[in-house]
Amino acid sequence: VDQQEEDQVDQDDNFFVVDVHARSIKIMPGGYNEKKFTTLEKISVKNFALLNERIHSPNDDDDGHNYCEQCVMSFRVCCPKHPLYRILDRLVEHPIDDRARKTTPAFISIKTSSIPNAGLGAFTLTELPVGVVFGPYQGILSKESDTKGYSWKIRNVDAPSMYLDGSDPKYSNWMRFINSPRYEREQNLVAFQYNGSVYYRVIKPIDCEQELLVWYGPKYGESVGVFSTKRSSTKIRPFATTDVKNQFII
């Protein structure tokens, strides 16, 4: 009886996994075929409920939801059919001169970019599936844009526009090293705004040793880095922790 109860609990659990064939993040119930899916994290009951919360009439000026282009729907956190899985930076508690580099996840390498004259770039040391999310982008909020290309402009409906400036490596994170593509076909990340912060999402499978290259999403403005946002009063981190082996653990 005890074993049956334990098996029932396993079947009722839900997990973030990587679909090995589709090379994308999925949510699967317990008991899935481990040859077809790689386990990332177990999802708590509370967080699973958040993942299924749909926003039926979203306000475009409110960044407290995520839009799924494939389902043409908005969700409080993300689409349960096409979920997002956030990768955390390495923790650096105090400002140091080389802080940005030290926040780099273990499977990311910072080296000379494949884009001519772009300086340094960020390369992955493992395959990255669709749905992986990096962020938030870190920097200093300023009223003026950085001319070196390290700023994201954030428009707030309740306040003047601000710029998130990541030019100073002492106060930014490793995402400052992610460059923009020269051509549309090179893009593998898209930038989006959520709850007042900027994130980068993997939009197509990225092979090992490939450089990460980001561009902006069409719903967030007609010029790069322009977002229309209204900060939410609550912050949601819809991801649980687990002892299961995770290839993206930093």
Image (spheres, helix red, strand yellow):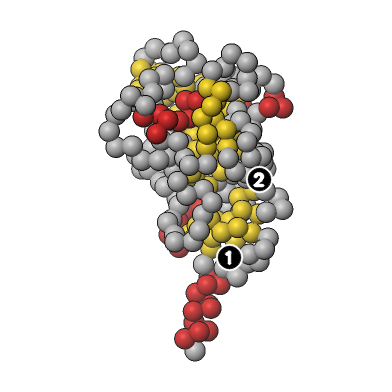
Residue under the image location 68 percent in, 60 percent down: 36
Instruction: Please tell me whether residue 99 is drawn above or below residue 234 in the rendered image.
Output: above
Could you tell whether 57 is left or right of 64 in the image?
A: right
Instruction: Please tell me whether residue 238 is drawn above or below residue 119 in the rendered image.
Output: below
Q: Pointer 2: what residue?
A: 71
Q: Residue furthest top?
A: 147
| Label at residue 60 | none
Is 16 or 193 nearer to us in this picture? 16
Residue under the image location 57 percent in, 33 percent down: 123
Q: Residue furthest front?
A: 111
Q: Amino acid at mark 1?
A: Pro
Instruction: Please tell me whether residue 117 is drawn above or below residue 220 in the rendered image.
Output: above
Check contact, mark 2 vs mark 1: CB within 8 A.
Answer: no
How many badges with numbers are in the image?
Answer: 2
Residue under the image location 72 percent in, 27 percent down: 185
Mark 2 neighbour density, 10 Å: few (under 14) some (14–19) many (20 or more) = few
Is 210 or 129 nearer to us in this picture? 210
User: Which of the two discs, 2 and 1, labels the residue nearer the N terminus?
Assistant: 1
> Is residue 197 among the parts visible in the rendering?
no
Q: Pointer 1: what residue?
A: 29
Identify the image quadrant of residue 127. Answer: top right
Is 215 or 234 nearer to us in this picture? 215
Could you tell whether 146 is left or right of 58 in the image?
A: left
On the image, the x and y values in percent for residue 211 come to 61, 30
Nearer mark to the viewer, of 2 and 1: 1
Label 2's element? Answer: loop
Could you tell whether 230 is left or right of 186 in the image?
A: left
Find the distance from the CA under tag 2 to the CA under tag 1. 21 Å
